[in-house]
Amino acid sequence: MPLSTPARIVSELASRGYNAEREAVTKLADAPDPERALDRAVETMPDDALKLTAGHVEAVLDRAESRADATAGSQRAAEQENGETATRDPSVSTGTDSGVSPDAGGDVPHETKGSRDVDLSKRAIEVANDMTGNSTGTGEYSDFVSVFRDRYEKLASKLRGRVNHRPTDAIENMAGGSEAALIGMVSDIRSTASGHWLVELEDTNGTFPCLVMKDRPIADLVQQLLLDEVIAVDGTLADDSGILFVDSLHFPDVPRTHSPSTADRHVQAALISDVHVGSQEFMADAWHRFTDWLHTAEAEHVEYLLIAGDMVEGVGIYPDQDEELDIIDIYEQYEQFSEYLKEVPGDMEIRMIPGNHDAVRLAEPQPGFDEELRDIMTAHDATVHSNPALVTVEGVTVLMYHGVSLDEVIAELPDEEASYDDPHKAMYQLLKKRHVAPQYGGHTRLAPEDRDYLVIEEVPDVFHTGHVHKLGWGKYHNVLALNSGCWQAQTDFQKSVNIDPDAGFAPILDLDTLDMTVRKFA
Ligand code: D5M
Ligand code: FE
Ligand code: ZN
C-alpha cells in the first residue's frame, strides 16, 4: 500500500508502535519516497523515543539527499515528477520552506519543533468541575436530599438579587393580598380546569402553589419550564394567602452582559463528538480525511481537540444494537478508537469526556474512564475528564457536556424553543436554567453526589455538547453554544424515527475571536 497520505503514514507508524509529530508526518508525506523515508526514520530513531519528531525525519531526508546529490541528482528530480509531491498542493509542504531545516547533521533532532510554529510553551489548559475519582454518592435517600439542596442553594443565589423573596412557610403567614416573591424548584406543573397554569414551587421549607393566568404574556414562559429547575416568581397573594398570582417569572440565566474571554494568540480548537468507533456506521473515510487535514499547513493553528462523548459505540446501549456492531468487544472498540486517535497530530492536545455509549456509569455526572480504559488510550496522551467538565483552553472556558438531557428538552419544550434541527436552541434553554440536566427521573439518569456537578455555576464562554448527532451553533447572551454532529452515518433506529444525522463535520473554533468555521469531511 503506497504511503500517499498522512493518515496512511500515521497508521503505518502506529502499527509499528510509534506516534509522530504532525510535522514529521508532513515531511514524510512530502518525501520523494515516503515508504523508504519512513523505514529509515524508524530505523535510525533512538530506542527510547516513542514519538517520531520532525528532526528525525529531517535528518534522514538530509542524509538521503546528500547521497543522492553526490550520485544521481537529476534522476531524483525526474522521479519526483512522477511521485506524490508533484500533485500535492504546495502549501501543504510549507514545513520545509521557512528556513529552519539546515540542522542537517541530525545531531539535535529531538526538540526541533521546527517550522510548524507549534510553541508548546504557549499552551494553557485548566480543568474545573471534574468529579472523576471524587464520587461519594451511594444512592441513599440522604444523597438525593443533599444534591437537591446544593442545586437549590447554587441556583437560588443567582436569583436572590432579582426578587425580594421569602421562604414558603413565611409566605403562608403573610397577609392576604400582599406582594410576595419566592424562589423554588418546580415540583409540579398543571393546567387548571379553566386553562390557567398552576406551578408548584418547593424550597427547603416546603412547597407553595403559584398561579399563572393563561392570558398573561408570562404564560408562554410556563411552556419553557421543566420539572426540578429552579426559578423565582413574584406576584400578589390571594385573600386567604393560599396561592400566589404570578406577575413575573425569572430564570437564573446568563447575564446579558457576559463578556467572553479569548486567547491572546491565534490558536484554534476542533470541537467534535460522537465518534462511535465500533459501529458499522462509523465513517472511517471521513475520519481519515479529517486527520489528514489536521496534518496540513491549513490546520497548523489547530492545537486542541475536544471530544464531547460517545467515543465508541459501546455494547448493549439500545435494544438490537448488536446487529449494527462492527466490533463487539468494548475493549477492542477502545483499542480501535485509540488507533484512530493516533492519526491525530502527536502535538495536538486532546481532551474528552464520556457519553452514554462509553464504558462508564450512565448516570450523570459520569466520571472519566477507569485506569484500564485509560491505559488502552495512552498512545496519544489524550486526557479524559468527567461529563460534564469545565475545560479552559488558553483563557476560553468551554463547558463540555455530552448532551443526553437535550433529548428531554427537545421532547418537552415547544419546537420554536428546542428541536433536533436547531440543537443549539435546546442548549440555550440549559444555559437559561443554568443546569445541564434540569429534569430528574425521566430519560436522563442522575447520580446523587455530595454536590450538584450539573449546575452551570460559572458562565462558560463556549458550551459544547453532542449526543443528538446534529450540527448547530449560535450565541446566547454572548455564549457560543455548539452541538458538534457526529462521525456515524444514519443507523436503522435513526432511520425509523427520522433522525437525519449531520455526520463528518469538524467545527473549528478560533480561540482568539470565538469565530467558528465548520469543515466537512464526509
Ligand atoms: O444518540 C443519538 C441520538 O439518537 C440521540 O438523540 C438519541 C437518539 N437515539 C438513538 N438510538 C436510540 C434508541 N434506540 N432509543 C432512543 N433514542 C435513540 P446516541 O447516544 O448517539 O445513540
Ligand atoms: Fe452519540
Ligand atoms: Zn449519545
Image (tube, rainbow, N blue to C red):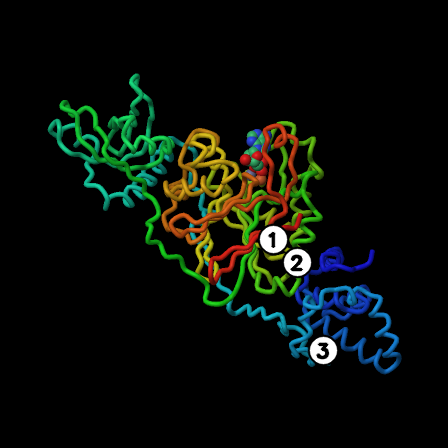
Which quadrant would the N terminus be assigned to in this image? bottom right
Residue 428: x percent and y percent?
A: 42, 43
Q: Which mark is residue 106?
A: 3
Residue at x-position 76% and y-position 57% = 12
Q: How many marks are shown on the rendered structure?
A: 3
When the figure is inspected, residue 77 is found, relative to residue 139, above or below; the finding is below
Q: Which mark is residue 293?
A: 2
Q: Earlier in the sequence, mark 1 or mark 2?
A: 2
Residue most toward the left? 175
Front in this rendered view, residue 124 or 498: 498
1 or 2: mark nearer the eye: 1
State the SS at label 2: helix
Circle 2 packing at 10 Å, graded few (<14), some (14-19), many (20+), is: many
Residue at x-position 51% and y-position 43% = 402
Do tag 1 and tag 2 residues touch (Cβ < 8 Å)?
yes
What kind of residue is marked 2? Trp
Q: Is residue 447 visible?
A: no
Q: Dot 1 corresponds to which residue?
A: 519
2 or 3: mark nearer the eye: 2
Residue 268: x percent and y percent?
A: 54, 60
